[in-house]
Structure formats: structure tokens, C-alpha cells
Image: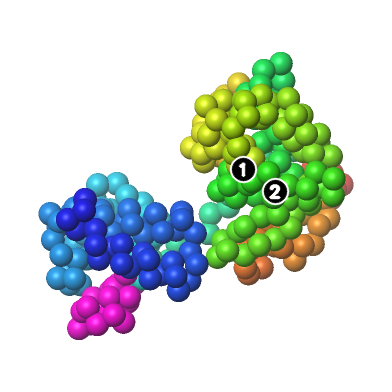
């Protein structure tokens, strides 16, 4: 990979310095650009024109990539070739006529409060892994953190006495998120009974760790949620993000205002948060039809 990664690395370094993008965003850019380079047999990306880029995108659709995936790829190409043009590496930006497809807004997967309760009660509290997983599940539902924010928490980020979590979100924006009694109870239990036992004196600042004495990854947490969903017979396709969705939806269902939910989620724009109101409205309509005598 080294023979064609120099221009990609330069691009990633520059956009990281200029915009403070998250490691996940940078990794997405890198993955997309490596796919493009491999598609043209490691050809210099600076020599590709509009026709080659259109053919590349068409082939992706033909082999099963979704329109949403291609839209993300187009965004990456726009970003990369705009940077190349600004750096005088190319005469013209070949992506100027690449148009992002209009995608339908998809509602997030919805979990009922009863389903969340089943999921949160699934870990076996007689085991150390179960205690850790219970703390993880309770905390993500109590705070609505992104999974990357959750697994990157340090011990110093959690104030158990005040009941708040300090989160470094997208664009290096910091926010304080309150957490509830259940999450605090199991965080204390995990820290006192599991974490110190696993570390055996090793100094590690990551809050959530494995018994291998390493910080857990997003993939690990995803697998744990899938495992518990299967265990309690939840048929829906769920992920860590599903609990973030549930956090927002259940707050709105119980009367929270949209602006407060936006701040808790760390959305830069309230328009991003409005998608959750659609779920609340659907539920209200169902309740109306079920209980109103003239519905």
C-alpha cells in the first residue's frame, strides 16, 4: 500500500489539521480512496478524470454497493479532488460535475422501552464480563453517546459523584452529559469489582477494558450487543447506534424538548435531531387510533 498512499496521507494530514476531523471520518476517507486506487490498478489518482470516476461509481452500483454508500464515496471524492485543486496538484477538479444522489431519509431502527429493558437486563451479573457489559449498556442508554465516544471514555471523563460524563464529540467539541442512577450504580460496580481486578496494577486510562487489559473496541461492543439481543430474542437488527436512537426517542416521548435532546446528542444542528420526532409522531398516531373513541 505504501507505493500509492503518499498523496492520500498528505490529504488526510491537511484536512485533519484544518478541520479537526475524527479518526473515524479520516479512516472512511482513506478506505474510499484506497478502493479507488485499487480499482485503477494503483494508478496515480491525480491522472483520473470525470469519466473514470463515473465508471468507478457505476461499477460499484453494479456489484451491489448501495446508493447511500456511493453517496459517501462521492463526498470523499469531492473532498479529495477539491483539496488537490487547491494545492495546485491538478489543473481542474474532475468532481465538479459529480452530483450527490438524493437519498430518502430513513428512520432509525426503533426499540420500545420494554425491549430496551430486556436488553439491559440480559448480562449475567455473576460474571465479570457481564458486569462490564451491564455498565456499558446502561451508560449508552442513559447518555445517548456515539459508540466511538463511549469506547474512548477515560476514567477522568466520568464524575461519579456529580453524575456527569465529559464527552469529546465530533469536531473535537466537548460536552457534559448527565447520567442516571442505574448507569452510575453499575459503573461503580464495574470499576470497583472488575476493572481493577483485570488491570492487576497496570496503569491504563481507558474506562472500559477487556480482560486482556486493553481498551475495548467499537467492534467488540457491537458483537456484545448482538449477542444480548439474540439472548433475549429481540428480532430487530440492532447496533450500538440503536440505543442512541432509543435514548433520543424515549426522551421525546416523555416530553423532552428537541433543543435539549440536540445538546445531549451533540448534534451541531437541530435539523439532524428532528428525525427522531417522526418516530414519536408515529407512536402518538398509533396511541390516538387505539384509544380515541372516534379515531
Q: Identify the residue under disc 1.
A: 205
Examine the rendered structure and indicate whether residue 129 appears above or below residue 266: above
Q: Position of residue 119 (x, y in %)?
A: 67, 30
- Name the residue rendered at 32%, 49% in the picture: 65
Does the magenta segment cover residue 246? no
Q: Which mark is residue 224?
A: none
Assign a secondary structure to mark 1: loop
Can I make out residue 224 in this image?
Answer: no
Assign a secondary structure to mark 2: helix
Q: Please state if 239 lies on the left or on the right of 189 as rendered.
A: left
- Which color scheme is applied? rainbow
Which sits in the foreground, 6 or 48? 6
Label 1 CA crowd tier, 10 Å (few <14, some 14–19, many 20+): some
- Check whether the beta carbons of the residues at disc 1 and disc 2 lie within 8 A of each other: yes
- Name the residue rendered at 12%, 54% in the picture: 41
Q: Position of residue 61 (x, y in %)?
A: 28, 53
- Name the residue rendered at 81%, 57% in the picture: 256
Q: Which residues are magenta?
A: 80-100
Q: Which mark is residue 156?
A: 2
Q: Please state if 164 lies on the left or on the right of 77 as rendered.
A: right
Amino acid at each position: 500500500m505504501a507505493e500509492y498512499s503518499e498523496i492520500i496521507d498528505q490529504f488526510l494530514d491537511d484536512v485533519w489539521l484544518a478541520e479537526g476531523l475524527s479518526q473515524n471520518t479520516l479512516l472512511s476517507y482513506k478506505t474510499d480512496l484506497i478502493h479507488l486506487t485499487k480499482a485503477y490498478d494503483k494508478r496515480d489518482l491525480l491522472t483520473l478524470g470525470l469519466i473514470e470516476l463515473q465508471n468507478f461509481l457505476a461499477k460499484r452500483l453494479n456489484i451491489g454497493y448501495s446508493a447511500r454508500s456511493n453517496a459517501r464515496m462521492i463526498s470523499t471524492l469531492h473532498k479529495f479532488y477539491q483539496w488537490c485543486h487547491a494545492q495546485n496538484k491538478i489543473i481542474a477538479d474532475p468532481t465538479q460535475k459529480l452530483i450527490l444522489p438524493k437519498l430518502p431519509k430513513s428512520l432509525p431502527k426503533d426499540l420500545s422501552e420494554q425491549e430496551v429493558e430486556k436488553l439491559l437486563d440480559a448480562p449475567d451479573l455473576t460474571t465479570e464480563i457481564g458486569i462490564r457489559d451491564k455498565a456499558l449498556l446502561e451508560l449508552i442508554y442513559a447518555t445517548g453517546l456515539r459508540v466511538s465516544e463511549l469506547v474512548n471514555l477515560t476514567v477522568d471523563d466520568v464524575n461519579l459523584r456529580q453524575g456527569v460524563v465529559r464527552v469529546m464529540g465530533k469536531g473535537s467539541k466537548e460536552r457534559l452529559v448527565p447520567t442516571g442512577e442505574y448507569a452510575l450504580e453499575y459503573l461503580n460496580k464495574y470499576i470497583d469489582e472488575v476493572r481493577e481486578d483485570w488491570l492487576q496494577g497496570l496503569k491504563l486510562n481507558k474506562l472500559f477494558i477487556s480482560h486482556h487489559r486493553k481498551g475495548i473496541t467499537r467492534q467488540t461492543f457491537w458483537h456484545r450487543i448482538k449477542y444480548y439481543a439474540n439472548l433475549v430474542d429481540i428480532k430487530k437488527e440492532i447496533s450500538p447506534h440503536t440505543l442512541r436512537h432509543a435514548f433520543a426517542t424515549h426522551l421525546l416521548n416523555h416530553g423532552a424538548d428537541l433543543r435539549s435532546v440536540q445538546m445531549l446528542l451533540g448534534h451541531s444542528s437541530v435539523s439532524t435531531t428532528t428525525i427522531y420526532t417522526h418516530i414519536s409522531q408515529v407512536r402518538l398516531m398509533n396511541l390516538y387510533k387505539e384509544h380515541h373513541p372516534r379515531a
